[in-house]
Amino acid sequence: MAERSLIGKTGTVSGKVAPNSTGEVVVQIRGGTEYYFARSVDGTEVIDVGSQVLIVNAGPGRILYVTALDII
């Protein structure tokens, strides 16, 4: 799974990440930008658009599990 290579990288939230919903994160890779679905790693965190996030895990279907950098 190519998304696994993103673990440990950072991205920017482009669609709000919230409990029980899927947001969106943009990641700069391979000389361009890619958009991925995003969920909070603990399932409770709310991360607003424009926030920087750390990619903690990756799942099937281009889903990244993220946490806000300001809480690390």
Image (spheres, grey):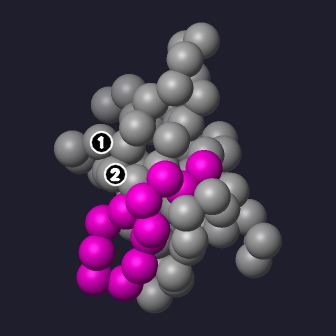
Residue underneath mark 2: 37
Is residue 42 positioned above or below 41 on the image?
below
Q: Residues within 10 Å of mark 1 (few under 14, many from 20)?
A: some
Which residue is outermost to the left? Answer: 61
Q: Residues within 10 Å of mark 2 (few under 14, many from 20)?
A: many
Are the residues flagged by discs 1 and 2 in contact, CB closer than 8 Å?
yes
Q: Name the residue rendered at 37%, 84% in the picture.
A: 19
Q: Is residue 19 magenta?
A: yes
Residue 61 in view in this figure: yes
Pick the quarter of the image with the C terminus: bottom right
Marker count (numbered): 2
Residue underneath mark 1: 62
Pick whichever, 57 or 39, lies toward us: 39
Is residue 39 positioned above or below 26 on the image?
below
Which residue is outermost to the top? Answer: 31
Pick the quarter of the image with the N terminus: top left
Q: Nearer the viewer, mark 1 or mark 2?
A: 2
Which quadrant of the view contains residue 65? bottom left
Q: Name the residue rendered at 60%, 50% in the picture.
A: 12
Give the secondary structure at mark 2: strand
Q: Is 64 left, or right, of 10 in this rendering?
A: left
Task: Compare marks 1 and 2 and give the one earlier in the sequence.
Answer: 2
Q: What segment is highlighted magenta in the picture?
A: 12-23
Q: Is residue 28 magenta?
A: no
Relative image position of residue 40 (x, y in whole percent) = 46, 71
